[in-house]
Image (cartoon, rainbow, N blue to C red):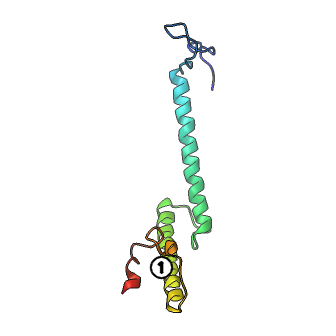
Amino acid sequence: MSSSPNNTSAAAVDANGNGDEKPRLTEEEKKQNHIASEQKRRQAIREGFDRLTELVPGLEGQGRSEGLVLKKTVEYMRQQLDERQSMIERVEQTGGAVDPELKSSAFAHPHNRGRAER
């Protein structure tokens, strides 16, 4: 960021002579800050999608369509939740105990809730 003649590097002084206000940014500095913030936000999103392509089977080596990444991620998570519920049921059917917290609705797939009671 470049400084502007309209912007002082010293703290601004308020009406009472106190020097604790921050200096005001010029419109150009505000614009540059906004651009930098937006670029940082977009980079974080790109990195998140890249990470998903590494974690979700079937996405490695494909073009990075964000819609496809999200769709495949949701499918994968639903599959994982279904497998988890099946494991809980197998443990209980064989006489094992499962911690009630692990069976809580916070972990359960909405499609599977109530499945064990059938």
Q: Is residue 33 above or below residue 114?
A: above
**Which of the 4 image quadrants contains residue 51?**
bottom right
Instruction: Identify which residue is drawn at 56% across, 30% down.
Output: 32
Quadrant (top left/top right/bottom left/bottom right) for the N terminus: top right
Instruction: Identify which residue is drawn at 56% across, 31% down.
Output: 33
Q: Position of residue 27 (x, y in %)?
A: 50, 22
Instruction: Identify which residue is drawn at 39% across, 76% down.
Output: 113
Q: Position of residue 60 (x, y in %)?
A: 61, 69
Q: Is residue 20 above or below residue 35?
A: above
Query: How many discs appear?
Result: 1
Q: Nearer the viewer, residue 96 or 31?
A: 96
User: Is residue 99 found left or right of 113 in the rendered image?
Assistant: right
Considering the numbered disc 1 on the image, is that residue within a helix, a strand or a loop? helix
Q: Residues within 10 Å of mark 1 (few under 14, many from 20)?
A: some
**Which of the 4 image quadrants contains residue 29?**
top right
Extreme residue in the bottom direction: 94
Q: Position of residue 26 (x, y in %)?
A: 53, 20
Q: Which residue is mark 1?
A: 82
Q: Nearer the viewer, residue 44 or 10?
A: 10
Q: Is residue 98 above or below residue 105?
A: below
Quadrant (top left/top right/bottom left/bottom right) for the C terminus: bottom left
Instruction: Identify which residue is drawn at 52% across, 76% down.
Output: 80
Amino acid at the residue labelled 1: Asp
Q: Position of residue 111 (x, y in %)?
A: 39, 76
